[in-house]
Image: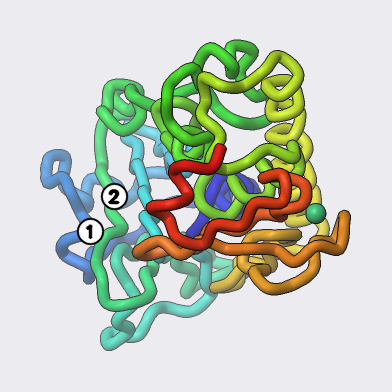
Amino acid sequence: MPELPEVEITARRLDAALRGATIESTLAPGINALKTFDPPLSALEGSAITSIHRRGKQFVIEFGGGLALLVHLMSAGRLQLYDKRAGPRDRTSRLLLRIADPDHPLRELRLREFGTKQAAWVKLLPADAVDDEELIATLGPEAWPQPPDDLRARLKAPRPLHTMLRDQRVIAGIGRSWVDEILWTARLSPFKRGDDLSDEEALALREAIATVLDGAIEHYERVIALPIPDKLPLPLQVHRKGGELCPRCGATIEQVHYEDYVMCYCPAEQTQGKVLKDRRLSRLLK
Ligand SMILES: [Zn+2]
């Protein structure tokens, strides 16, 4: 699932390639993906892209003429640029923005989605209405480049850090992959409650958020070029590494299975050696 670093690098690459480009035509083959009909998608035809940037884990594509497209990839979406048009039977196509560019006559910005679920969506709206969209209006402060100064206060609740850091209303941009990396870097238990953080722990957590997200974005700056690959090479140390050895201390990385994802942590450094694989028991472990 694309999180802040993945969306950030994609927005940078797309912005560099498309700023100033004019939309020739639009198509929404994934009919459910388009959440708005007024203004219609065709209102973009003939207008130029003025900026592609990120808000939390969402993209905002702005156009001359005052419109903006808010793009939410959900868990399996990708925003990709191709110099070839999607075939009519490409089942991953959700939204196609065809670009008028004499140097790249078949250029197309494509919202694609993998898997059977159709969850990714877009909304076309006046650019000045983006901030009022519920999804954007309820976002907490961005996790990067500066994690919020009041992080400790924001986390003061009897909920586990692993849950709170992924709550976009608390802090924006972190999801299932990077939360594991951040908590491992800060040597904090994923089960620790937000309101149990000491001053030092809160400081370590804030530093870890900055370090981990900086590191991921720097990594992508070195290795990612257009076209953005379907699967980004996430520079992970613990997430998806259950059963492997912790690269810092050599203990075995443990994992807790949830319905649709896996949490990974180093028991030696994060949970005082305690290993709990069952999520009901995990609640007891702080
Ligand atoms: Zn370790």
**Camera sees residue 19:** no
Residue 179 percent coordinates (x, y): 59, 45
Residue 218 percent coordinates (x, y): 79, 48
Q: In the rendered structure, are the residues bearing label 1 and label 2 in contact, judged by CB atoms less than 8 Å apart?
A: yes
Q: Quadrant of residue 97?
A: bottom left
Q: Quadrant of residue 32?
A: bottom left
Instruction: Describe residue 83's horizontal placement relative to residue 97 as left or right.
Output: right
Measure the C-alpha gap from mark 1 to mark 2: 6 Å
> Does label 2 point to a residue whose CB lies under 8 Å from ligand 1?
no
Q: Name the residue under label 1.
A: 33
Of the pair 124 and 215, the residue shown nearer to us: 215
Q: Residue 122 carries which label?
A: 2
Farthest-out residue, left: 37
Instruction: Describe residue 50's horizontal placement relative to residue 132 as left or right.
Output: right
- The first of marks 1 and 2 along the sequence is 1
Q: Which residue is drawn at 48% across and 49% down?
A: 282
Instruction: Describe residue 247's horizontal placement relative to residue 227 as left or right.
Output: right
Q: Residue at x 71, y 24 (%)?
A: 201
Q: Estimate how packed mark 1 is, as few (under 14), some (14 to 19) or many (20 or more) residues with alpha carbons within 10 Å.
A: many
Of the pair 278 and 3, the residue shown nearer to us: 278
Residue 230 percent coordinates (x, y): 54, 73
* Picture mark count: 2
Q: Estimate how packed mark 2 is, as few (under 14), some (14 to 19) or many (20 or more) residues with alpha carbons within 10 Å.
A: many
On-image quarter of the C terminus: top right
Ligand 1 shows up in the quarter that is bottom right
Q: Quadrant of residue 28?
A: bottom left
